[in-house]
Amino acid sequence: MEFYRDWKFWMFVIASLNTFLTIFSLVIIKFNDFKHVGKDMTEIKEKLESIEKTQRAQGEAIASMKGICAERGKVLDNITKQGK
């Protein structure tokens, strides 16, 4: 009896193809998941850079305001000293 007429042979072939297809599908799914992770990481990095720029600008604005307040405070001190 030829091996290709045996039902066990065809069950083995079908099981092998099924296994190959399953592994191939899982690899494709994982690859796509990693691709999305890369995109997500890029978006997060861009958002963090934007936040960092905003915080830096706010810090510079606060420092500038402190400088202005200090100058005005000196002017007010001079005015009050002259008024005494």
Image (cartoon, rainbow, N blue to C red):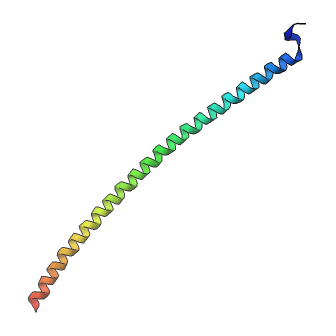
Q: Nearer the viewer, residue 8 or 66?
A: 8
Quadrant position of the N terminus in the picture: top right
Q: Where is residue 32 in the image (x, y as percent from the top left)?
A: 58, 35
Q: In this view, does 43 lie above or below 83?
A: above
Quadrant position of the C terminus in the picture: bottom left
Q: Where is residue 61 in the image (x, y as percent from the top left)?
A: 28, 64
What residue sits 71% from the left and 30% below the top?
22
**Number of marks in the rendered image:** 0
What residue sits 14% from the left and 79% below the top?
75
Q: Which residue lies furthest to the left in this view?
A: 82
Where on the picture, by quarter, is residue 8? top right
Where on the picture, by quarter, is residue 69? bottom left
Q: Is residue 1 above or below residue 81?
A: above
* Left or right side of 56 for 14: right
Q: Nearer the viewer, residue 65 or 34?
A: 34
Q: In this view, does 75 lie above or below 20?
A: below
Q: Where is residue 65 in the image (x, y as percent from the top left)?
A: 25, 69
What residue sits 42% from the left and 47% below the top?
46
